[in-house]
Image (tube, helix red, strand yellow):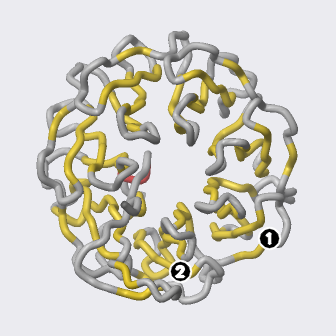
């Protein structure tokens, strides 16, 4: 697998094509930002319409550009790049112009995550010896360390109201393979452990729930850690749930599950009911990402060329899966552009 899949990121934009949304409203198409190594084997960030047309290279440097994150208003993209030697956080306009370096250290800086109001970026950095979480203004000023432990702390996302940050920490090491889910105030105060031995976590769109993966199954809990409830019950030692994402309205959860030596995309209601498999082609079908209106899901799959990942888009019920990239190189980290 190509190195660009070590972290992740992709998005959608709205430009030249017009289409109806089924409600009588005429709108421009959504777009997806993604990472590809098609340009001489280096990881660059691209932007395309959600049908795969008008794919445009936004970055073109000898280093790796990856780990992209859209600003909430869809006008900018933050990303990590090692073009200057080590990995730093950069930001650019949605069309690739105005690239600006925000961090300047001799360490690793990655996992940028925008606050919901678009005024701050949280990120992880090794500048003080190990992976800690920092926050800064979107112009790179005011860089502030939020966590301070001897273990690894990694960003998992701002709460929808911007008052808290969810993160994974290995400070307690109850399970050497997994971290614990913590939450803290946006200024780093009030760090509180919510669970033990988890590998993934995501806020519900309304901020009242957190979905996470424990012992290969998906759970949901209240934002304070109470009411932890399993939503899946995965059989076998090989089978497991791998990643998850909430639908924009919070009514459903899409997830990548490992079954029968393949990865499949599933969807279920937020309470775990009405679980359905959306993909049918055997292979690695991973990284589900909802479109802003919840009507479509983008995902990554190597179903056509074994080991070579392409981006697909399907309806939210699994119908009409369409390959939207077609290149011998690896394409991944698909992220929809937020609608303005």
Looking at the rendered structure, which numbered label has been put on residue 291?
Answer: none
Q: Secondary structure at mark 2?
A: strand
Q: Is residue 333 left or right of residue 61?
A: right
- Residue for badge 1: 275
Query: Could you classify mark 1 by the number of other residues whose Cα lies within 10 Å: few (under 14), some (14-19), or many (20 or more)?
Result: some
Pick the front one: 266 or 339: 339
Q: Is residue 82 visible?
A: yes
- Residue for badge 2: 314
Pick the front one: 92 or 125: 92
Q: Toward which corner of the image does residue 281 lie, by quadrant?
A: bottom right
Query: Could you classify mark 2 by the number of other residues whose Cα lies within 10 Å: few (under 14), some (14-19), or many (20 or more)?
Result: some
Q: Look at 42% across and 82% down and name the residue there.
A: 323
Q: Look at 23% across and 20% down and name the residue there.
A: 105
Image quadrant containing the N terminus: bottom left
Q: Look at 36% across and 66% down and name the residue there.
A: 12
Position of residue 57 relative to residue 283, above or below, is above
Q: Position of residue 254 (x, y in %)?
A: 65, 64
Q: Secondary structure at mark 1?
A: loop
Position of residue 152 relative to residue 41, above or below, is above
Q: Look at 77% across and 42% down and name the residue there.
A: 214
Position of residue 153 relative to residue 296, above or below, is above
Q: Position of residue 194 (x, y in %)?
A: 74, 27
Q: Is residue 277 left or right of residue 129?
A: right
Q: Toward which corner of the image does residue 175 lie, by quadrant?
A: top right
């Amino acid at each position: 697998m190509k190195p660009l899949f070590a972290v992740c990121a992709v998005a959608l934009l709205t430009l030249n094509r017009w289409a109806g949304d089924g409600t009588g409203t005429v709108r421009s198409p959504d777009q997806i930002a993604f990472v590809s190594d098609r340009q001489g084997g280096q990881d660059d960030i691209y932007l395309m319409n959600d049908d795969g047309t008008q794919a445009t290279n936004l970055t073109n440097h000898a280093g790796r550009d990856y780990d992209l994150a859209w600003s909430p208003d869809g006008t900018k993209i933050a990303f990590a790049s090692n073009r200057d030697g080590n990995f730093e956080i950069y930001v650019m306009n949605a069309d690739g112009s105005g690239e600006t370096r925000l961090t300047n250290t001799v360490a690793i800086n990655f996992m940028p995550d925008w606050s919901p109001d678009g005024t701050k970026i949280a990120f992880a950095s090794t500048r003080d010896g190990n992976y800690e979480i920092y926050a800064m203004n979107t112009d790179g000023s005011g860089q502030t360390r939020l966590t301070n432990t001897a273990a690894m702390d990694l960003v998992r996302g701002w709460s929808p109201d911007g008052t808290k940050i969810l993160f994974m920490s290995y400070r307690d090491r109850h399970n050497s393979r997994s971290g614990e889910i913590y939450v803290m105030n946006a200024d780093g105060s009030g760090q509180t452990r919510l669970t033990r031995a988890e590998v993934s976590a995501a806020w519900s769109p309304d901020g009242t729930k957190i979905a996470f993966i424990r012992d290969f199954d998906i759970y949901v809990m209240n934002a304070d850690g109470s009411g932890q409830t399993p939503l899946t019950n995965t059989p076998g030692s090989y089978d497991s749930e791998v990643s998850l994402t909430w639908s924009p309205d919070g009514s459903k959860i899409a997830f990548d599950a490992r079954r029968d030596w393949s990865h499949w995309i599933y969807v279920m209601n937020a309470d775990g009911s009405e679980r359905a498999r959306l993909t049918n082609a055997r292979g690695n079908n991973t990284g589900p990402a909802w479109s802003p209106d919840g009507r479509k899901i983008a995902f990554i799959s190597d179903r056509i060329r074994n080991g070579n990942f392409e981006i697909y888009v399907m309806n939210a019920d699994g119908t009409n899966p369409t390959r939207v990239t077609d290149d011998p190189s690896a394409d991944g980290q698909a992220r929809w552009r937020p609608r303005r």
